[in-house]
Image (cartoon, grey):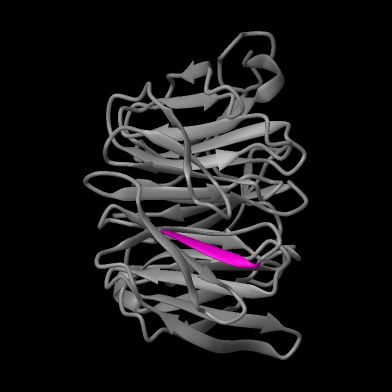
Amino acid sequence: MRGLWAVALLLTPLVGLSQEPYGILTGHTGPIWGLDFSPDGKYIVTAGGCFDKVVRLWDVELGLEVYPFKGSIDRVMAVSFSADGETIASVAPMERAVRLWDVDFGDCEVLESHAGALLSVVFSPKGNFLAAGAASGKVEVWSVSSDGYQRLYLLSGPKDEVRDLAFSPDERCLAAASKDGNVYIWETSSGAPVQAFSAHESGARGVAFSPDGEFLATCGADYLVKLWEVGSWTLLRVLKGHRWYVNDVAFSPDGKVLASACSDGTVILWDPASGDLLATLKEHKKPVTGVAFSPDGKFLASSSADKTVILWLLSELF
């Protein structure tokens, strides 16, 4: 791993103060559009948007930037760690490609895309697939093996931007949230369409499977978070509480907490089983663009257009 960079950061533990940040990561010079934890929970990767265009890697415990991955020519819209933690995938619309960054050495491989300008990207949980979603509504999928990346298929169906993607825990299904308001489900092995359903008026913006694969959470521009039963794809519950666009959703590793990120600068934590609101986190000064739980369930991280990532210690929130 590259040596730690001495950068100006704030990561001051605030343990004992209910619903206060554990720490704040600063260093981006523009909005942050997404984030992801490494599989071992040691690192966070963040996507630098306008005026930044840098993928940044952070050490969670030390609160230090480990390495800035530079070279993107456009705002970075999404990032994802591979299952083995050795690779970071990132997408920037003008590049029409997926960049694959070597975590240890900083080298970059480029996967050209047939889908057009890419807005979303995700590795599958077991590391066998990589998917990227485009402004065109297309979704491109690659297989991942020791032999490298092999393009499998180009999926169609969405009539507008694919804002977010998620693989089911068993990798059998791929879900996409589209600006056309629908959520699309495909069979990963073949690319065959499984289901498409209307989810959010004015656009779906985020999608996430529960750890047990039984539920799908979605969010959108209608200020709502919704829970769906996987398989029947029926609506189980509508979670109301946000006052603006909901941009992202994420389940905790045990499935007992659902986090949602809102453009009003808040993060809401829900009990997905009951739909009860557990906590509202109000620290960001601008839209919250992404949320992610650490693999051990200790931390929740939220990224924002205010150029910061906030770490929340779950045990202190409720």
Quick check: 128 left or right of 263? right
Above or below — where is 295 with respect to 88?
above
**Residue 238: x and y, percent?**
42, 30
Q: Residue at x 35, y 46 (%)?
A: 31
Task: Residue 304: name its quadrant.
Answer: top left
Say which of 186 and 267 sits in front.
Answer: 186
Task: Residue 220: name its quadrant.
Answer: top left
Quadrant location, the N terminus? bottom right
Question: Magenta residues?
Answer: 172-176
Q: Residue at x 64, y 38 (%)?
A: 63
Say which of 175 and 205 sits in front.
Answer: 175
Q: Is residue 175 magenta?
A: yes
Q: Residue at x 61, y 77 (%)?
A: 107
Q: Residue at x 27, y 73 (%)?
A: 136
Q: For residue 291, say whether it is visible.
A: no
Quick check: 288 left or right of 23? left
Q: Is residue 213 magenta?
A: no
User: Which residue is situated farthest in the left direction here?
Assistant: 202
Q: State the predominant SS element of the stretch in magenta.
A: strand
**Residue 228: x and y, percent?**
50, 43
